[in-house]
Image: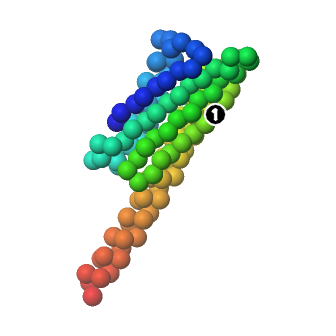
Amino acid sequence: MKVDVSYKYMEDSKLLEEILDKNISKIDKRLSRFAKYDTIHTSIHIEKNPHRNQYFCRSHIYLPSRVIKAETNSNDAIKAINLNFTALIRQLSKLKYKLVKHLSLHKDKRLEQSKT
């Protein structure tokens, strides 16, 4: 999985890197179903409002079949990042559930056809 991280109006820090690494590893675990594809790309953009104490985190996961995106904001950069990755994990779990359900339905149909 390729990961791109960009910052706007702020500097990256050791703490932000650790938080991102921890959350990226959580996402990487959930992408095991798509591990056979090399085209998975994750883009993360963290931005600070230059006039207020507000942070935005936007992220996209480019899968072979679709794009998953999340956008959050908060008064704390770490909270914005964690909320963003929570939303991504929730969406990945839904997608994984739909894929497993879809594959099991097709498997059942194939078994019925082979019996007849």
Q: Quadrant of the N terminus?
A: top left
Residue at the spot x=59%, y=29% of the render?
57
Q: Residues within 10 Å of mark 1 (few under 14, many from 20)?
A: some
Q: Is residue 26 in view from this perspective? A: no
- The colour scheme used here is rainbow
Is 70 displayed left or right of 104 in the figure? right
Residue 109 position in % (x across, y down) = 35, 77
Residue 84 position in % (x across, y down) = 58, 34
Is 94 displayed left or right of 52 in the figure? left
Q: How many marks can you see?
A: 1
Residue 95's place in the image compared with 27, above or below, is below
Residue 24's place in the image compared with 87, above or below, is above
Residue 68 position in % (x across, y down) = 50, 45
Q: Quadrant of the C terminus?
A: bottom left
Q: Is residue 39 in view from this perspective? A: yes
Residue 91's place in the image compared with 52, above or below, is below
Residue at the spot x=57%, y=20% of the render?
8
Three-letter residue code for mark 1: Thr
Which residue matches tag 1?
A: 72
Residue 104's place in the image compared with 39, above or below, is below
Residue at the spot x=61%, y=36% of the render?
71
Residue at the spot x=33%, y=70% of the render?
107
Viewer-proximal residue among 91 and 111: 91
Is 79 displayed left or right of 37 in the figure? right
Residue 4's quadrant in the figure?
top left
Q: Secondary structure at mark 1?
A: strand
Residue 39 position in % (x across, y down) = 33, 43
| Residue at the extreme bottom | 116
